[in-house]
Image: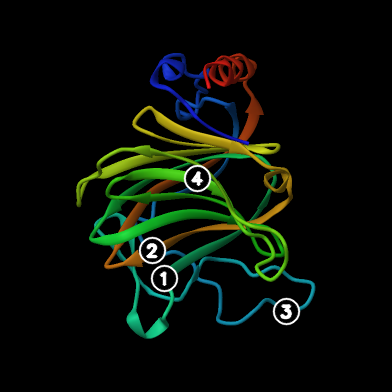
Amino acid sequence: MKYILLPALLAVPAVLSAQLSPPTLMTSCGKLLLSEDFSKAVEQAPPGKAAPGKTATGWRLRPGKWEFADGAMKGTELAEDKHGAVARFPFPFKDAVIQYEVRLDGCKGTTFSVNDAKDHVCRASIDAKGFGCRKDDNDHEGPDKAVDFGRADLPIKPGQWKTVIIEILGEEMVAQIDKKAVCGSDPLIATEKANFGFTVAGDGASFRNLRVWEAKPNLSWSQSKSKLQKKK
């Protein structure tokens, strides 16, 4: 199931918490679980996989080139890797509200992706023309396929910081920038997640002010979604 929110449905945000939580749509924010400004180099996980029965700690900054400067973490794809730049962080969760700031520094596009212990689950993608979100392919060699939930047109200039808000609750996810939002649902999204991270395709994207909160239901969301579905 997929649908795109209209501006009229964004007029009434969820109640903000005392932790300066973002103007969410589907959820309200509970406890603050993670805060990372990227103002200095982060702790990195050692190369290779974690020992049996243990979870790797710290950010996995590979492939790609990752730098820390001017209060941000910047990722750039390297041609020799034959793969986009990837920064991943082990963080078990099921439902969450994620907020971060992104700046396009010449890249073709960047994503915030979420994985379970097996493979990809979902992601929000951003480029110079706008953003979208999707349910990912979770098996690659099997019958599962990625499902796009939609896209919002939003010109983003190089060097311009944008705040991204991602909400995941049960089978649904919402991605929001500048009061525009794209959302959808799929049973895979309700799975237990194992990690999340950033990807960068091309010459660079920067990230700062990452926050993760517990996600709690917002009762007004069902009403807004119902109105939207009637208009389709």
How far separated are the C-alphas under marks 3 and 4?
33 Å
How far separated are the C-alphas under marks 4 and 1?
18 Å
Kind of element beneath mark 3: loop
Residue kind at label 3, given as amino acid type? Ala
Kind of element beneath mark 4: strand
Nearer the camera: disc 3 or disc 4: 4
Tag 1 and tag 2, C-beta contact below 8 Å: yes
Q: Residue at x 61, y 14 (%)?
A: 223
How far separated are the C-alphas under marks 2 and 4?
15 Å
Left or right relative to 63: residue 89:
right
Q: Which label belongs to residue 133? A: 4
Looking at marks 2 and 4 on the same chain, the residue that comes earlier in the sequence is marked by 4
Q: Which residue is mark 3?
A: 51
Nearer the camera: disc 4 or disc 1: 4
Classify mark 1: residues with Cα within 10 Å, few (<14), some (14-19) or many (20+): many
Q: Is residue 49 above or below residue 105?
A: below
Q: Which residue is mark 1?
A: 84
Tag 3 and tag 2, C-beta contact below 8 Å: no
Residue kind at label 4, given as amino acid type? Cys
Nearer the camera: disc 3 or disc 2: 2
Looking at marks 3 and 2 on the same chain, the residue that comes earlier in the sequence is marked by 3
Residue 6 or 114: which is nearer the viewer?
6
Residue 178 or 7: which is nearer the viewer?
7
Q: Is residue 126 above or below residue 78?
A: above
